[in-house]
Amino acid sequence: MPESKETVGIDLGVKHLAITFDGEFYEHPKFPRESERKLHRKQRVVSRKKKGAARRRKAIRELARLHEHIANPRRDYAHKVSRKLVNSYGLIAFENLNVQGMVKNHHLAKSIVDAAWNQLVRYTTYKAEEAGRGVVLVDPKNTSQPCSNCGEIVSKKLSERMHHCEHCGYVQDRDINAAQNILKRALAG
Ligand SMILES: [Zn+2]
């Protein structure tokens, strides 16, 4: 793969899976709703049935199949997005998910969101290694509050979707502003 001087900061989100510093949005993969409902139902059956009972064993087998049904499209999608990122950029900056203090508004089931973020970062990291490209994981603390244009702290609640800096007048989508801060941190570090 030819060298690339292109850099990108990426905010991982709940509303969207990933948002780039220049305003590209990647949706969360859509799961068949019916599969999720079935999954919860089977999980209840498995936890209720007596150990060793034939019906429980059957429910466990069905549960495994359902997990695959949901996991496969998510995996394919994470491969697609990570491939696109590695092909397009020489340096890719994410928030470090292993650092405590990530406060995100979880509308979707937390485990589903966490799994999707982790998968995307993992796949991007190994593809970047193979391609000789860089992934930088930055401190996730307060990536959304500073103004990416002037550095001033612009406090905003989770419900506020726009970043509006009264200091320099910079107006931006809050997630794009965060992605810009993530890139700045990666380049400064
Ligand atoms: Zn500003």
Image (spheres, grey):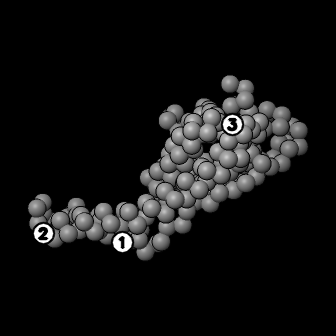
Residue farthest toward the front in the current orientation of the protein: 1
The CB of the residue at mark 3 lies under 8 Å from ligand 1: no
State the CA–CA distance, disc 2 to disc 3: 52 Å
Residue farthest toward the top in the current orientation of the protein: 189
- Vertical relation: 9 (above or below) 33: above
Q: Nearer the viewer, residue 117 or 6?
A: 6
* Label 2: how many Cα within 10 Å (few below 14, some 14–19, many 20+): few
- The answer to which image quadrant residue 42 occupies is bottom left
**The N terminus: image quadrant:** top right
Tell me where residue 144 appears, x and y as whole percent.
Answer: 68, 41
Q: Nearer the viewer, residue 16 or 48?
A: 16
The mark found on residue 54 in the picture is 2
Identify the residue at horizontal 67%, vertical 47% (top origin): 87
Q: Secondary structure at mark 2?
A: helix
Residue 5 as seen in the image, left or right of residue 100: right
Identify the residue at horizontal 49%, vertical 67% (top origin): 31
Q: Nearer the viewer, residue 143 or 125?
A: 125
- Vertical relation: 142 (above or below) 123: above
Q: Are marks 1 and 3 in contact (CB under 8 Å)?
A: no
Tell me where residue 96 appears, x and y as whole percent.
Answer: 56, 36
State the CA–CA distance, disc 2 to disc 1: 19 Å
- The answer to which image quadrant residue 11 occupies is top right
Q: Nearer the viewer, residue 84 or 36?
A: 84
Q: Secondary structure at mark 3?
A: strand
Q: Amino acid at mark 3?
A: Leu
Tell me where residue 39 appears, x and y as whole percent.
Answer: 35, 67
Residue matched to label 3 = 91
Q: Secondary structure at mark 1?
A: helix
Q: Amino acid at mark 1?
A: Lys
